C-alpha cells in the first residue's frame, strides 16, 4: 500500500505516519460501529425521502412570496418524517443555529413566562438571546425570565436542583445536547430522554426544546424521538451534509412549529411564505449525504482523541468514550502548540491551505481566538475546522471533515507541525 507516499507528498513524515497507522490499527471496532450507525441513519433519510415522493419538481427555484412551494414544503415533510416529528421548519431564511434557537424560544415564550436550562449555562451566543448578557431585543427585554440549574461536579443532572427550579412560571426547558465549547460532557439521546421525562413528571405541560447542534446522526435516534417538543439546529453543521450554503431547522409538534413560523415570517403568514431562492438541491442532497458525512467527522474525532491521548495530551472526550456529538477537544498546554495545531489543520484544507491562522480579538470573546478553516461554505463547521480561545489549558476544539481521509490528513498535519516544533514527542517504536 502506498498511502505513505501520498502523505509524504503532502508533508507528513514517515515517523508521524507510522505512529498514526499504529493508532488506527486499534480503531477497527470503533469505526465499524460508526459505519453501522451511518448505515441505519442513511436508511432513515432514504425512507423519509421516498415516503414524501421527492422528485425533480422539488428542486425548482422559487422567488417572491414563495406560495405553494412544493420543494420547500416537501423538504420540511422529509425532515419531520426523519426526525419523527409532526412538523418542521427548514428554511434558508433561518440564517444560522443561533437564529433558529432564537426563533424557537421567542415564538413559544410570552411575557411573564420563565425559561429554564437544567444543564448549566447555555451556548455563548444564547446568552444575548436570553438576556444573560444585556442585549437589545433579548427575551429578558420582553419580560421572559430565566433560571438555570447547574450540573453536578461529575457532569450529571442535578435532579433536586432542577425540581426546585421548576415553578408556576416555567414554560419552556432548553437542553443543549453538545458541550459546545465548554468542558462538560455531551449528553446521549437516552440521557436527554430521562431528563425530559423527569421534567414532565413534575410539570406535564412544560415545553422541552433541545439544542441539537453537532448531534444530528451521531446516534440512531434524535431527542425528538424521546419526548422533545422541539429540536433545533444549523444546516451548516451536521444535517446540511456540507452542501447546504445556509439555513437552520426546527422540528417538533405542530403547535410549536406553527408558532415558530409565525415568529419567523409574520402572524397570519407563517409557513405559507418564504421562497427557496434555488438552493433546495443542496439542502436535499446535503441531507441525503449527512449520515456518511457525520460518520467521517466522527472517525476523525475518535482518531484525533486516540492519537493525542497516546502522546500524553488530555483529550475530551477520551479516546475510548462513546460519542454524542462530533466535537473533540485537545488540551495542548501552550499558545505555540495551539497555533501549530491550527496551522496543520489549515494546511490540509482544499480551500485557503496557504493561509496562516493567526490569533485575533473576536467580538464577544474575552480572550484572543485562533481558528483554522478552509471551507467551501464560509464558517461551515461540518467541514474540517479547529478553533479555541488562547487561554489555559490551551484547548483546541476540533470538528468536522466531509470525508474521513481529509479529516485524517488534517490530524496528521496538526501532529506534524507540533513534532516539527518539538511541541510533541512521538513514542519510540
Ligand atoms: C453552533 C452552535 C450554536 C449556534 O449556531 P450558529 O450557527 O453558530 O449560530 C448553538 N448551540 C450549539 C451547541 C452549537 O454548537
Image: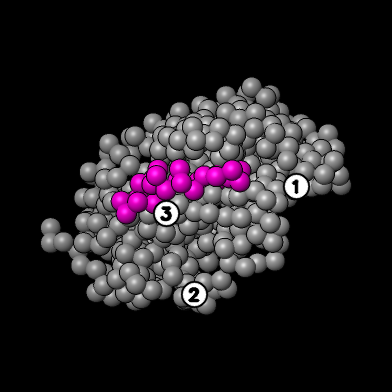
Where residue 326 appears, x then y in whole percent? Answer: 43, 48
Residue 422, image quadrant:
bottom left
Q: Could you tell me which residue is drawn at 50 percent across and 63 percent down?
A: 373
Q: How many marks?
A: 3
As drawn, 80 above or below 418: above
Q: Nearer the viewer, mark 3 or mark 2?
A: 3
Q: Is residue 370 magenta?
A: no
- Residue 293 visible? The answer is no
Q: Position of residue 94 (x, y in %)?
A: 69, 50
Disc 1 designates what residue?
Answer: 263
Residue drawn at the location 33% of the way across and 69% of the way down: 393
Please tell me which residue is depicted at 60% across the width and 50% down the height of the picture. 114
Q: CA distance from mark 3 to mark 1?
A: 30 Å
Q: Nearer the viewer, residue 58 or 9?
A: 58
Q: Circle 2: is it few (<14), some (14-19), or many (20+) Cα within 10 Å? A: few
Graded by Cα atoms within 10 Å as few (under 14), some (14 to 19) or many (20 or more), the crowding at tag 1 reads many
Gap between marks 1 and 2 measured at Cα: 32 Å
Nearest the eye: 370 or 134:
134
Q: Is residue 12 visible?
A: yes
Which residue has dot 3 on it? 150
Instruction: State whether label 1 is within 8 Å of ligand 1.
Output: no
- Disc with the residue nearer the chain's start (1 vs 2): 1
Q: Are marks 3 and 1 in contact (CB under 8 Å)?
A: no
Give the magenta part as a residue range.
Answer: 150-175
Tell me the residue that label 2 is attached to: 366
Mark 2 lies on a secondary structure that is loop
> Regarding mark 1 in the picture, which secondary structure is present there?
helix
Q: Residue furthest top?
A: 51
Image coords of residue 19 (percent x, y): 22, 56
Upstream in sequence: badge 3 or badge 2: 3
260 relative position to 177: left or right: right
Label pair 3/2, CB-CB below 8 angstroms: no
Amino acid at each position: 500500500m502506498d498511502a505513505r507516499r501520498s502523505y509524504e507528498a503532502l508533508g507528513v513524515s514517515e515517523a508521524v505516519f507510522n505512529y498514526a497507522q499504529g493508532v488506527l490499527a486499534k480503531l477497527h471496532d470503533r469505526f465499524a460501529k460508526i459505519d453501522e450507525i451511518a448505515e441505519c441513519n442513511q436508511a432513515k433519510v432514504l425512507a423519509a425521502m421516498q415516503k414524501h415522493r421527492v422528485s425533480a419538481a422539488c428542486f425548482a427555484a422559487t422567488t417572491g412570496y414563495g406560495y405553494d412551494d412544493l420543494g420547500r414544503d416537501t423538504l420540511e415533510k422529509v425532515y419531520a418524517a426523519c426526525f419523527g416529528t409532526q412538523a418542521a421548519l427548514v428554511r434558508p431564511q433561518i440564517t444560522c443555529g443561533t437564529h433558529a434557537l432564537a426563533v424557537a424560544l421567542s415564538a413559544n415564550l410570552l411575557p411573564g413566562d420563565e425559561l429554564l436550562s437544567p444543564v448549566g449555562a447555555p451556548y455563548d451566543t444564547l446568552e444575548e438571546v436570553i438576556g444573560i448578557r444585556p442585549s437589545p431585543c433579548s427575551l429578558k427585554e420582553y419580560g421572559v425570565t430565566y433560571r438555570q440549574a447547574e450540573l453536578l461536579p461529575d457532569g450529571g443532572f442535578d435532579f433536586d436542583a432542577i425540581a426546585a427550579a421548576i415553578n408556576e412560571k416555567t414554560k419552556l426547558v432548553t437542553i443543549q445536547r453538545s458541550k459546545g465549547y465548554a468542558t462538560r460532557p455531551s449528553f446521549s439521546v437516552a440521557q436527554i430522554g430521562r431528563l425530559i421525562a423527569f421534567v414532565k413528571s413534575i410539570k406535564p405541560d412544560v415545553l422541552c426544546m433541545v439544542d441539537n447542534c453537532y448531534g444530528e446522526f451521531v446516534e440512531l435516534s434524535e431527542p425528538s424521538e424521546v419526548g422533545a417538543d422541539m429540536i433545533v439546529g444549523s444546516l451548516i453543521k451536521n444535517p446540511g451534509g456540507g452542501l447546504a450554503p445556509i439555513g437552520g431547522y426546527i422540528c417538533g409538534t405542530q403547535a410549536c412549529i406553527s408558532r415558530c413560523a409565525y415568529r419567523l415570517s409574520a402572524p397570519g403568514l407563517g409557513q405559507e411564505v418564504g421562497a427557496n431562492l434555488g438552493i433546495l438541491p443542496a439542502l436535499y442532497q446535503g441531507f441525503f449525504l449527512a449520515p456518511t458525512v457525520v460518520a467521517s467527522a466522527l472517525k476523525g474525532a475518535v482518531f484525533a482523541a486516540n492519537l493525542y491521548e497516546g502522546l500524553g495530551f488530555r483529550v475530551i472526550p477520551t479516546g475510548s468514550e462513546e460519542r454524542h456529538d462530533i466535537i473533540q477537544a485537545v488540551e495542548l498546554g501552550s499558545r505555540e502548540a495551539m497555533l501549530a495545531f491550527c496551522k496543520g489543520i489549515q494546511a490540509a484544507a482544499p480551500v485557503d491551505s496557504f493561509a496562516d491562522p493567526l490569533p485575533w480579538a473576536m467580538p464577544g470573546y474575552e480572550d484572543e481566538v485562533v481558528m483554522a478553516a478552509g471551507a467551501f461554505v464560509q464558517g461551515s463547521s461540518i467541514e474540517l475546522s479547529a478553533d479555541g480561545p488562547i487561554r489555559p489549558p490551551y484547548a483546541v476544539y476540533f470538528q468536522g471533515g466531509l470525508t474521513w481521509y481529509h479529516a485524517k490528513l488534517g490530524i496528521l498535519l496538526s501532529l506534524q507541525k507540533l513534532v516539527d516544533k518539538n511541541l510533541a514527542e512521538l513514542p519510540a517504536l
